[in-house]
Amino acid sequence: MQERPAEAVETLPDPPGLVRPRLAVWVPPEVLPVVVSESVLVRLLGSDHKKPKRRRPAADDGSGRGSGAASRKTSGKGTGVKRKPPKKRVTARRDASGGWADASGIWQDSGGARKGVSSARKGVSSTRKDASGAGKPWDPEEPELLAVTPEMEAQAQEAMKQWKMKVSGMRVMATKPEKGGAIWRIETSKGPRSLKVLHRPPARSLFSIYLQDYLVKQGARVPRLIPTNTGELYTEVGGKLWIVTDWIEQLVPASKDLEGAKQLCYGLGEFHRHSRGYVPPPGAEVASRLHRWPKTYQKMAAKMNWFREVAKAYPEAPASAAVLAMVDRFEAQAKKALERLEASPYASLAARGGPAWGVVHQDYGWSNGQLGPGGIWIIDLDGVAYDLPIRDLRKLITSTMDDMGVWDPEWMRGMIEAYNEANPIEPDLYKVLLIDMSLPNEFYKHVKDMLVDPLMFLTPELDQLLQRLAASDETKWQALRELGLDDANAKVPGRRKKQGRAGR
Amino acid sequence: MIVTEKLPVPPVRGGAIQTYVAAVAPLLGRHVDLTVLGVTDPTLPEHERVEGVEYVRVPGGTLDRYLEGVLAYVRENQFDLIHIFNRPRLVLPVREAAPDARLVLSLHNDMFEPHKIAAEEAEAALAQLERLVTVSDYVGQRVVELYPAAAEKRQTIYSGVDVHQFLPVWSPEAKPVRLRLRREHGLKGKKVVLFVGRLSPKKGADVLVRAMPYVARRHPDAALVLVGSKWYGENKVSDYVAYLRALAARSPVPVVTTGFVTPDQVHQWFLAGDLFVCPSIWPEPLARVHYEAMASGLPIITTNRGGNPEVVAGHGVGMVVEQPEDPKAMAAAINQVLGDRALRAEWGHNGRRLAEERYQWSRVADEIAQVWLAQAP
């Protein structure tokens, strides 16, 4: 193939009928909104850009969730389908996968240059938006953010030479500018495809790439990797691995009701089941969170004290009082969860090893699991790691409940049942699922950012959010007890009678 | 000498073990035909001879990958003695590749913990060793607790410091550096408490920051300097670093954070200090910053965790805090030292003297040489 200069590839308008689920207005519950700093927008869009509204994680969005939560509480018993997680207005999504939990950015002004960040993007990199790993700005209002550096553009051109295909156009669909990851939709002589540069170190990326290949061979609905000219599953350019897959045209998000949630759960169960037995080839870094649970719990408990100390140091911040009023309770919950975990069958389950369990996706939800030919298709596999599979399920359930503002046992049962149909949950694993839900995941998620900039995050909105959280926490414990937390004989929902239908 | 799969020697990317090996290898190379086998690095050749020492570098990153190159090299070459650093899991494969070599293992961390090596392999590896060298009694005792049979093989060799690089704060060469750093960072006339290390929860920098309000009551002219970053060469703001920063911003006394400082510059920061504190709250093997602080002539406060007290308690160079998690206990110790100029001077001078007498790399190399030249059992 002839080498083409970068500019020779024009940016295409949306092809007719293209579904752009990534840009959907509704953002799934596992996705946190992140503040885009004004200075970044000014730098990127010019100073005449109108001031962005400050966006708070799950701030009251006018959907009536705040005051309506309590009244809705009574509405859905048995007919949970009516209840929907609220729509959100969010500009940037936050990748919940493992390696992204930590913030990044620079320490004051003495920071060094970062890899993969061009000078044009330096401004971006020092903000919390990117700092939180929220490198995927999906907001159609700010399409300018969806650009890659000329350097990466050139690397993309270089990488694409490794595949037998004529590329007539490409468009950036998602970027992680801080980490140096990006996804393009490319129009090729072989049909629409996806070109992706994986931001992780090559050895780590190999784990994900070979998993994806394994899954396809197992019959899972994940995009097929297109082999290169030399039959490889990837190519390496610029110290990163690049892959090309089919672009699955027909994907549509599942509905945001219980039926949709069940479909997602069923698809998740299938994914986990298909991933069992996976062993990465030599040279791949084994990504595993299987044995890390106690550490994760400990860390969460430890960070509760950080929240306390910071709130104490910023007494004038509007949400400090709420944090201080609640942190004892949630710290105790985290410690109790750790006790429960240690007394649980967790260790013996984990001891079975990664291949016995398969992998978790780590960033699964309404965006990375979508309806397509044959059922739920799962995309964006780069964060996969060995783990107890129910961790993905736990995240999906708890973030959905958190979004609803009420923990509804019917929903939770429905989701677990649907998952259980595709990938049966043994009683010991079910116990661990409930324990993982008992962690104060929601409080942690909502207040975590206060560490980065206390005055900016300890706002009246956070205060309101915490008041709602405190109320929903009451319903959480009721729901968890109903589902069998601390009950040695807890039954896995739906094991006895198959209800069918969900997921299909 | 076989170093680890993670970082290259010389320590172009940092690393305590790498620093250690780079310091002693040239000294040992005078007496024996020495090869240092380590991991490749883009900035270093795969093979070179420097100061009489062969450096051979094979691909690493993961232990499995590293093992391939290591074993291939060991098979192709003859060695009388192989000294492995901090990787008990290399012992058995290396033994297989070199059935007749004498094997020595140096431990810089608790690498024999059950989650790091299976008991069966650990016992077999220990059986193959002629000697187990540890950086502190603590590290050695921990192995013996797990595997009593290791007792007769283990020996502590304390690490060292370059006393020509780390100069005492009162030396003529040091003074301009001290004055410059203090001027540049608003520390003129302050009593500077110094932390040098990675910014991670177990290193306890947050306890220091939280101690400062209590210190400020007694010493309003105190200041805290935190030298280091979350990880070598990076200035990423982890949650922990963010937490530190949030607390530091509200500190009643100045808290200066330097971010990452390269190993060849870090000695300068010691010169800015009046008191060195190692606030570790984890069982640390024995942090080399203690030697560096001694060489810099700084009084030391450390914690009763791991091997750290071994070079402080009873040596007249500093004091040991018994409750490292408690900011008040930390503050009490700091207040005591900051309030006693004579004590600081005494501890500082003792530290420098000890560094010169006991903690030079030449002494470390001598002790390793004695292990190597010992009569084979």
Image: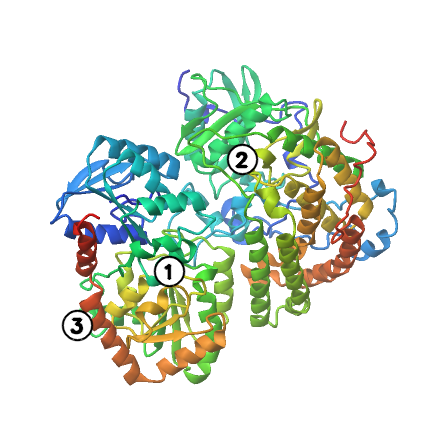
Whether residue A324 sits left or right of residue A418 in the image: it is left
What's the CA distance linking mark 1 and mark 2? 42 Å
Q: Is residue A219 above or below residue B252?
A: above
Label 1: which secondary element: helix
Displayed quadrant of residue A2:
top left
Nearer the N terminus, badge 1 or badge 3? Answer: 1
Q: Amino acid at mark 2?
A: Asp
Q: Are marks 1 and 2 in contact (CB under 8 Å)?
A: no
Q: Marks 2 and 3: which is nearer the front? A: 2
Query: Residue placed at 34% from the left, 47% from the top?
Result: B126
Q: Chain of mark 2?
A: A
Q: Which residue is mark 3?
A: B172
Q: Marks 1 and 3: which is nearer the front? A: 1
Specify the label residue A382 is tagged with: 2
* Res. A47 in view: no
Q: Which residue is mark 1?
A: B141
Label 2: which secondary element: loop
**Residue A165 location (% of width, % of height):** 49, 16
Near-viewer residue (B46 or B354):
B354
Near-viewer residue (B233 or B254):
B233
Q: Amino acid at mark 1?
A: Gln
**Residue A423 location (% of width, % of height):** 70, 33
Displayed quadrant of residue A448:
bottom right
What's the CA distance linking mark 1 and mark 3? 42 Å
Specify the label residue A286 is tagged with: none
What's the CA distance linking mark 2 and mark 3? 56 Å
The quadrant of the picture occupied by the N terminus of chain B is top left
* Res. B164 in view: yes
Whether residue B33 sits left or right of residue A126 in the image: it is left
